[in-house]
């Protein structure tokens, strides 16, 4: 089974591309969605124990948790020590389920795939990209986004050119949905021929 890593900088179209793979019948593991589910489930009591007052009605309230961890490396490390092992457990269950179901390819949608060193756990990687103008336009449409926030996020991420250099496949999402769909189909065809 080929584990295809999917990544891209903010606003590059990673979520849309993940959906395109799913529409082709490829199981997609969304690490962000796993974190959201964990915050509403088994991680909540662990987070509450480490960061009292951050869980409301059994769910981690990100608005309460954020100020306690962002920009505070020791607190962020403490949170990651709680969440990362649980995310890996969820991923292991996903991979085993896909294997049992006979899938030849799965997509692991992992933010900061290269920055975190997680690309060592994938067989090949897809990077989604778009022009800087399109990227900024997309990001600035997000609720609560400011130019300062966008610049701060982008500064923490590996440059797009370096991500593209490390990729086995690159999908340019700046030309619309149909070309992106064709790129996904071409990748799947190439992998099926292996």
Image (tube, grey):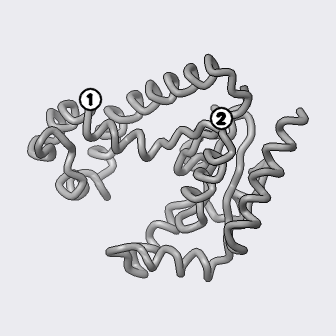
Quarter-of-image position of residue 59: top left
Q: Is residue 60 left or right of residue 23?
A: left
Q: Is residue 82 above or below residue 54?
A: above
Q: Earlier in the sequence, mark 2 or mark 1?
A: 1
Q: Residue at x 68, y 76 (%)?
A: 131
- In x, y percent, where is residue 46? 21, 31
Q: Secondary structure at mark 1?
A: loop
Residue 70 position, x and y percent, is 30, 56
Q: Which residue carries the number 2 mark?
A: 106
Q: Disc 2 or disc 1, which is closer to the eye?
A: 2
Relative horizontal placement of residue 12, taking residue 57 as reference (left or right): right
- Per the model, the C-alpha gap separating discs 2 and 1 is 25 Å
Please identify the residue farthest to the right as the structure is shown.
193
Residue highlighted by disc 1: 42
Q: Quadrant of the N terminus?
A: top right
Q: In percent of the image, x 37 and y 75: which residue is there?
A: 145
């Amino acid at each position: 089974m080929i584990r295809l890593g999917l990544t891209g900088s903010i606003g590059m179209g990673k979520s849309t591309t993940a959906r395109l793979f799913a529409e082709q019948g490829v199981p997609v593991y969304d690490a962000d969605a796993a974190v959201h589910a964990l915050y509403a489930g088994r991680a909540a009591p662990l987070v509450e124990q480490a960061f009292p007052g951050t869980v409301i009605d059994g769910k981690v309230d990100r608005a309460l948790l954020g100020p306690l961890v962002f920009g505070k490396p020791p607190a962020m490390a403490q949170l990651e020590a709680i969440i990362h092992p649980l995310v890996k457990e969820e991923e292991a269950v996903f991979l085993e389920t896909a294997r049992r179901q006979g899938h030849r390819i799965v997509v692991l949608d992992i933010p900061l795939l290269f920055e975190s060193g997680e690309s060592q756990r994938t067989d090949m990687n897809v990077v989604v990209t778009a022009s800087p103008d399109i990227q900024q336009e997309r990001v600035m449409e997000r609720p609560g986004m400011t130019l300062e926030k966008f610049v701060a996020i982008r500064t923490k991420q590996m440059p797009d050119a370096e991500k593209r250099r490390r990729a086995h496949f690159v999908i340019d999402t700046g030309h619309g949905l149909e070309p992106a769909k064709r790129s996904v189909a071409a990748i799947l065809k190439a992998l099926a021929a292996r």
